[in-house]
Amino acid sequence: MEDNGNVLAFGCHPDDIEFMCAGTLSFLRKKGYKIHMATLCGGEKGSMTLSKEKIRSVRLRECEDSAAVLAASYRWAGWEDIEVEFCHELRVRVAKVIREVNPFVVFTLPALDYMVDHEETSKLVRNACFCASVPNFDTEDVPPTKGVPYLYYWDAVESKDWLGRRTPVGFYVDVTSEMETKVKMLSCHRSQRDWLLAQHGIDQYIEYMKEWDRRRGKEAGVGFAESFCQHLAHPFPQDNILKSILGAAVIGVS
Ligand SMILES: [Zn+2]
């Protein structure tokens, strides 16, 4: 698919994107790309005290604040935490977002991760990247896209699968220069950060993210890095367009 300037990061829960790929998004923004962010769920299970509706409204506002840091659009695809499954209704909701944004690059969760919500969202986004271009796939009158976008999976949480095995890394992106922006975006998720701060007495929310990017950075020989794998099955694009756009910041695995 041709470069049309639109990049989409599609997460499952509020803050998934910020933890795993906000540095790379910040980089792409600097290169002139329009960033779009979407989450399938609204963070409904992220509070011990507030109702689902109340915590959702708080967390969707936090997502919007975070997206604003990159002048990005933000969409909630209308589903609820811990209730994600690969079903027709969600296939349509996710494909509708892809059609509305019309991205040529999509980032999403990896196929193997610690939470079933994440894995099902990964499958839904992968499916939507393909079927958004199929004219007879019906998504309430949103026109089909013109092709299949580049699809990238960010890393699994703690870089491991269910059996504790290291998940694969296709390449790293050196995000050392983008860490300030990444921290700013993650800090917008105040409800989660404050809860951990009160509970543990340290700013674990931010420090946890930094620690993992530092580990990936060490593997890549830089200060901080994010890691990705590209979806290379038929008929997805086969070249690594991020390498063309970001140049030396994209570091291969030796
Ligand atoms: Zn999540």
Image: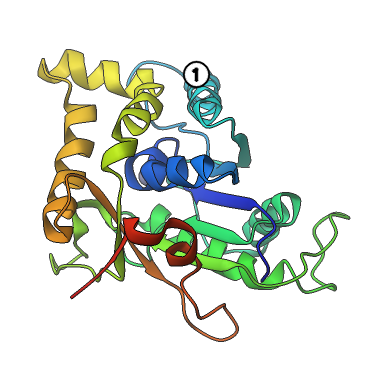
Task: Look at the numbered disc 1 and give the secondary structure of its residue.
Answer: helix
Report the side of 3 relative to 146 (left or right).
left
Q: Colour scheme in the image?
A: rainbow
Q: Which residue is mark 1?
A: 58
Q: Give the camera-side residue of 153 and 183.
A: 183
Please identify the quarter of the rendering in which residue 197 is found. top left
Residue at x 70% of width, y 50% of height: 101
Residue at x 51% of width, y 17% of height: 54
Question: Percent x, y for residue 76?
Answer: 61, 38
Task: Pick the quarter of the image with the N terminus.
Answer: bottom right
Question: Percent x, y for residue 250?
Answer: 34, 61
Question: Percent x, y for residue 133?
Answer: 75, 70
Q: Is residue 57 above or below residue 244?
A: above
Amino acid on which the number 1 mark rests in the picture: Val
Report the side of 85 relative to 188 (left or right).
right
Report the side of 196 relative to 48 (left or right).
left
Please identify the quarter of the rendering in which residue 38 is found. top right
Badge 1 crowding class, 10 Å Cα cut-off, few under 14, some 14 to 19, many 20 or more, is: some
Q: Is residue 187 above or below residue 156?
A: above
Residue at x 36% of width, y 19% of height: 191
Rendered-image quarter of ligand 1: top left
- Farthest residue in the front direction? 248
Task: Pick the quarter of the image with the C terminus.
Answer: bottom left
Q: Is residue 165 above or below residue 212?
A: below
Question: Percent x, y for residue 236?
Answer: 57, 78
